[in-house]
Amino acid sequence: MKRLEIGPSHPLRKLFKKALEFGTKVNPVSRQDTIEYIEREILLEFIHTDNLFKIRDASGRALEDIAEMLAEGEILLNAQSFDREFQVHKHIGDYTLFMLGMFPSALGRRRGKEFVLGKIIIPDGDLTDHYLLQGKRSYRIASEFSNRELFQELSVNFQLYRKILELVRVYLESIKDDAYLRAKRIITGNA
């Protein structure tokens, strides 16, 4: 599958920049590098919907459940290296932030497995709460491996960045962007 080239002057990138500017006007941030990360590693990465479920198990099956992703990223369970653990936790942080900010309605139809967050077990909780707790936790774990300041910022201020992405969604919905609306239909199952 050929990837869409999304360079600095690509219209989609310009659109995301405008949408992020809209979000940060209402929710100012002190770290522009975090906003650039969100644009590059979340919005542009997940424009390819196959990247939403890029974590795969040993048999190659795409994992859609956070609990399964956690097992895949745990060095004591399925992760073959610390780099794999980092990649999985980075992805979980990015994925949960993206879904909570951009497509929260899609979470209502999902039923995740029981989540184990540190020593806290949250059976049958609201999936939004699971995503919030696990996103923060995964970014904190990712910060132990690489880009400490960036991932700590995303962990500590997860709700702020979620609110910014919620405003990105509002902006994209208000201008009726075709690419966003198409992705929304695919992700929410209303295709």
Image (spheres, helix red, strand yellow):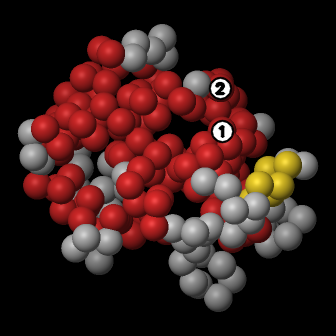
Query: Crowding near pointer 2: few (<14 within 10 Å), some, many (20+)?
Result: some
Secondary structure type for disc 1: helix
The span from disc 2 to disc 1 (Cα, nearest Å) is: 7 Å
Amino acid marked by disc 2: Val
Q: Earlier in the sequence, mark 2 or mark 1?
A: 1
The image quarter containing residue 91 is bottom right
Seen at 18% across and 56% down, the residue is 181
Q: Is residue 85 left or right of residue 131?
A: right
Please name whichever residue, 73 or 106, is drawn nearer the observer in this view of the structure: 106
Secondary structure type for disc 2: helix
Seen at 13% across and 38% down, the residue is 174
Say above or below: 68 vs 117.
below
Q: How many marks?
A: 2
Q: Residue 164 appears at what percent x and percent y?
A: 38, 29
Of the 4 image quadrants, the one containing the N terminus is bottom left
Q: Residue 130 appears at what percent x and percent y?
A: 65, 51
- Contact, mark 2 vs mark 1 (Cβ under 8 Å): yes
Seen at 31% across and 31% down, the residue is 167
Of the 4 image quadrants, the one containing the C terminus is bottom left
Q: Is residue 38 left or right of residue 125?
A: left
Say above or below: 21 vs 89.
above
Q: Can residue 154 be seen from the camera position used here?
A: yes
Say above or below: 131 vs 14.
below
